[in-house]
Image (cartoon, rainbow, N blue to C red):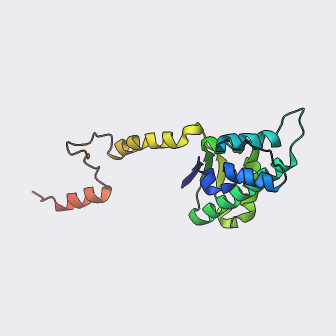
Amino acid sequence: MLLQVADALGAVDPAVRRDDVLVRRTVLGDVDALPEDADDETALAALLAAACPGQPGIPDPVALALLDETAECLGAALADLINLFLPERILIGGWAGLLVGPHLLPEIRRYADEYVLRHAAARTIIEMGRLGPDAVTVGAATLPLADFLTRGGSRPGPGGTGTPPRTAVQAVGERHRTPMG
């Protein structure tokens, strides 16, 4: 099983939503952190820029604390998913995942490892998705192809549905019903 956490980081972890970032930064003393009209992507990018300013800058301790808290929340949420579904792989993708992933992936893995059950953790890999910011769209675009391949490469019939391929059980059952001559 494969789980993809794509563009839904705000659903998995409210810590990355603009309003929550704004409120949490204000509570921690960073009152002028974001403009009121900032969207989610702008808020998250500003948070990352403050925490990882590059060579000349000094990291903002409030932003670092928020990113660590976000990594812990995501790690705990992913641990819950691992405990429930026992996936082989979890992919972090979409615009939010691609933005935070390169900075937080090691910490997300560490926190997930702290919260997950040992037997479940041994079989799951958490990594970055490779479909880019449009992972959901790309995934949806593959559905017709998957349907085509499920039908064995045949086109749908006149009614809009193709003749589904026979299963091995159906083929054996039909063979036993065939009169012997």
Res 142 → quadrant: top left
User: What residue do we see at 84% from left, 34% from top?
Assistant: 54
Residue found 68% across the figure and 67% down from its top: 117
Tell me, yes or no, if residue 98 can be seen here. Answer: no
- Name the quadrant of the C terminus: bottom left
Nearest the eye: 157 or 70: 70
Q: Is residue 1 visible?
A: yes
Residue 58 screen position, x and y as percent:
90, 39
Image location of residue 140, percent across then percent down:
45, 43
Badge count: 0
Residue at coordinates 65% horizontally, 42% vertically from top-left? Answer: 39
Quarter-wise, where is residue 168 in the image?
A: bottom left
**Point 60% across, 43% down: residue:** 94
Describe residue 107's horizontal placement relative to residue 126 as left or right.
right
* Residue 176 in the figure: left or right of residue 60: left
Front residue of 38 and 140: 38
Furthest-top residue in this view: 56
Residue 49: x, y in percent? Answer: 78, 39
Q: Residue furthest left?
A: 181
- Asked which quadrant contains residue 116, the reply is bottom right
Q: Residue furthest front?
A: 36
Q: Nearer the viewer, residue 35 or 142?
A: 35
The N terminus sits in image quarter: bottom right
Work out whether 141 lies above or below 177: above
Residue 110's x, y, as percent?
A: 76, 56
Q: In the displayed structure, does residue 150 sit left or right of residue 89?
A: left
Q: Nearer the viewer, residue 84 or 32?
A: 32
